[in-house]
């Protein structure tokens, strides 16, 4: 599903880092070696159909690589359609 993040991501937390990341080998092969962290946060997003929702997002972040593979984990609270 494609979506656009509206504004900034809030309540960012690191949920895994280094060897605690299950997909570390794949990330290093796909994007290059880095100090990887798996992160989560909340943001308002616009879905492909135009609806705007509050969602919990998960992604990988590598030092010097930026944010990679952002995915919607779940929708939160009141939803604006």
Image: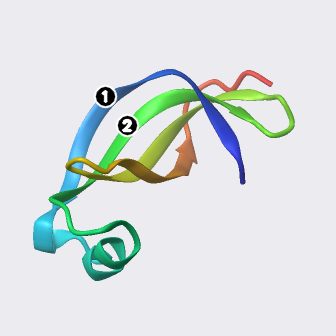
20 on left or right of 65: left
Residue extending farthest to the right is: 49
| Left or right: 40 as drawn, with respect to 63 | right
The residue located at (30%, 48%) in the rendering is: 39
Q: What residue is drawn where x is 23% and y is 53%?
A: 15
Q: Nearer the viewer, residue 56 or 36?
A: 36
Numbered mark located on residue 11 in the image: 1
Viewer-side residue, 74 vs 20: 20
Q: SS for tag 2? A: strand
Residue 72, placed above or below residue 79 = below
Determine the image quadrant of residue 17. bottom left
Task: Tell me the quarter of the picture where residue 10 sits.
Answer: top left
Tell me where residue 62 appears, x and y as whole percent: 25, 53
**Earlier sequence position, callout 1 versus callout 2:** 1
| In the image: residue 16, left or right of residue 74 | left
Residue 20 horizontal side relative to residue 74, left or right = left
Residue bearing the label numbered 2: 41
Query: How many numbered circles are shown?
Result: 2
Label 1 element class: strand
Q: Are marks 1 and 2 in contact (CB under 8 Å)?
A: yes
Up-down: is 81 above or below 38?
Answer: above
The location of residue 30, given as percent across then percent down, is 40, 73
Image quarter (top left, top right, bottom left or bottom right) of the C terminus? top right
Q: Mark 1: few, some, or many residues within 10 Å (few <14, many ≥20)? A: few
Q: Which residue appears at 66% of the width and 29% of the height?
A: 53
**Within 10 Å of the Cα at label 2, are there few (<14), some (14-19), or many (20+) other Cα atoms?**
some
Between marks 1 and 2, how big is the CA–CA gap?
5 Å
Occupied quadrant, residue 8: top left
State the quadrant of the N terminus. Answer: bottom right
* Residue 61, placed above or below residue 81: below
């Amino acid at each position: 599903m494609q979506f656009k993040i509206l504004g900034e991501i809030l309540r960012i937390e690191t949920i895994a880092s280094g060897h605690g990341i299950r997909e570390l080998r794949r990330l290093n092969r796909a994007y290059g070696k880095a100090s990887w962290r798996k992160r989560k946060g909340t943001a308002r997003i616009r879905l492909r159909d135009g609806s705007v929702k509050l969602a919990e997002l998960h992604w990988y972040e590598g030092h010097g690589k930026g944010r990679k593979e952002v995915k919607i984990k779940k929708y939160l609270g009141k939803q604006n359609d």
